[in-house]
Image: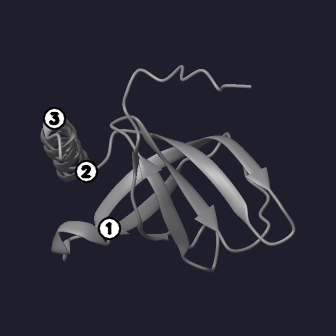
Amino acid sequence: CMKVEKRKNIRFDDIGKVESPELCLFSGVLVDVSKQGCRVRFPTSLEIDTEMDYELKISPVRYNCTDCFLIMARPIWHSSTDDSTEIGFAILHSPSLKKYDSYVDKLLEEKQNMDSEQELLDGINID
């Protein structure tokens, strides 16, 4: 069964540390990002209030991001197991929104570069 992608924006797998003390005492891990949202996995089972906005401090691993982004986000969906909770957040207007957007733009640029390199490699026939 194939999952149909209904998103308007491309999501990029990425990794980083996400801190949101009001949501969880432990840091979470960034799973993927897009211009409109992100998915975060926390290492414990959590009760999520989808009516509340949370401040997320995202520290991406790539691009030597010494900067972190402070973004406001609202949980749209979540799924929990005994030892973890994954949350899909919608990004709201935030102090670091421009920085976050340019970070997602870099991921897009990187993906396009990788795709075009792959096309070059695919075009080379080795007999």
Q: How crowded is mark 3: few (under 14 residues within 10 Å), some or many (20 or more)?
A: few
Q: Which of marks 3 and 2 is in front?
A: 3
Task: Residue under label 3, please give it.
Answer: 123
Image point (39%, 34%), residue name: 36
Task: Give the amino acid type for the residue marked by disc 2 in the picture.
Answer: Tyr
Mark nearest the camera among 1 and 3 is 3
Q: Which amino acid does label 3 sit on?
A: Gly
Q: Locate residue 30 relative to residue 58 in the image: left or right.
A: right
How crowded pointer 2 is (Cα within 10 Å; few <14, some 14-19, many 20+) is rated as: many
Query: Residue at left 33%, top 37%?
Result: 35
Q: Nearer the viewer, residue 121 or 113?
A: 121
Q: Name the residue under label 2.
A: 100
N-terminal label among 2 and 1: 1
Q: Can residue 23 be seen in the rendering of this structure?
A: no
Is residue 60 at least partly visible in the picture? yes
Q: Quick one: which residue is furthest to the front in this view?
A: 127
Placement of the N terminus among the 4 image quadrants: top right
Q: Distance between the residues labelled 1 and 3?
A: 34 Å
Q: Residue 92 location, x and y as percent?
A: 40, 39
5 relative to 91 in the view: left or right: right
Q: Is mark 1 on a helix, strand or loop?
A: strand
Q: Which amino acid does label 1 sit on?
A: Pro
Where disc 2 sits, the SS reads helix
Residue where numbered disc 1 is placed: 60
Q: Position of residue 38 (x, y in %)?
A: 46, 47
Please tell me which of labels 3 and 2 falls first in the chain. 2
Q: Name which of mark 1 and mark 3 comes first in the sequence.
A: 1
- Report x, y in % for residue 122: 22, 39
